[in-house]
Amino acid sequence: MNLTRKAIHSKVWFIMGNKIGAVIRAKRVELSYTQEELAALVGVTPSTIGQIERGDIYPKFETLEKLTLTLAIDANAYFYDSNYDNNEAGEYARILEQMPPYKRKIAQGIIKQIYKDED
């Protein structure tokens, strides 16, 4: 199947729009905001919030930035499965990120050695 560049672009934006909308909706509901309240906070209409959440439209960058900041969303959530944040590997990744660089290098060396020893 030979997809045109435009078709590929449309497909990517469709997938991203749905993912972004789902993340925004989940966080809005978690924080108990109505679409109307969130819209007022970020300066758009409630209809726009609904369209973004459904993936009908992709938000402008400025709107996405306001939504991300207002809802305190980790931007990684738009690209990665949320299970990453809730599993053991995610916890280890957070620990490594908080370490000073020299300790992180030591920890990574230990992990690599353990992995190598299992082969």
Image (tube, rainbow, N blue to C red):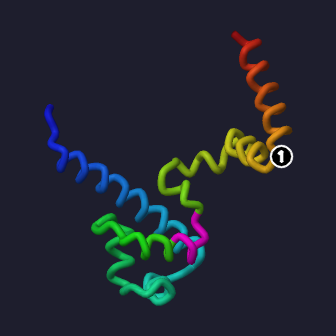
Tell me what residue is drawn at x 51 percent, y 66 percent.
26
Q: Quadrant of residue 106?
A: top right
- Callout 1: SS: loop
Tell me what residue is drawn at x 23 percent, y 53 percent.
10
Q: Which residue is mark 1?
A: 100
Tell me what residue is drawn at x 56 percent, y 51 percent.
82
Q: Is residue 11 left or right of residue 35?
A: left
Q: Quadrant of residue 64?
A: bottom left
Q: Is residue 50 above or below residue 86?
A: below
* Front-lying residue, 83 or 8: 8
Q: Position of residue 97 (x, y in %)?
A: 74, 47
Q: Is residue 64 magenta?
A: no
Q: Is residue 72 magenta?
A: yes
Q: Position of residue 83 (x, y in %)?
A: 58, 47
The span shown in magenta is 68-73
Question: Label 1 amino acid?
Answer: Pro
* Front-lying residue, 37 or 29: 37
* Front-lying residue, 19 or 31: 19
Q: Is residue 110 left or right of residue 34?
A: right
Residue closest to the far front: 102
* Front-lying residue, 62 or 13: 62
Q: Position of residue 55 (x, y in %)?
A: 33, 64
Q: Quadrant of residue 96?
A: top right
Total number of numbered labels? Answer: 1
Q: Is residue 107 left or right of residue 9?
A: right
Dot 1, crowdedness within 10 Å: few (<14), some or many (≥20)?
few
Quarter of the C terminus within the rendering? top right
Tell me what residue is drawn at x 79 percent, y 34 percent.
105
Q: Is residue 75 above or below residue 11?
A: below
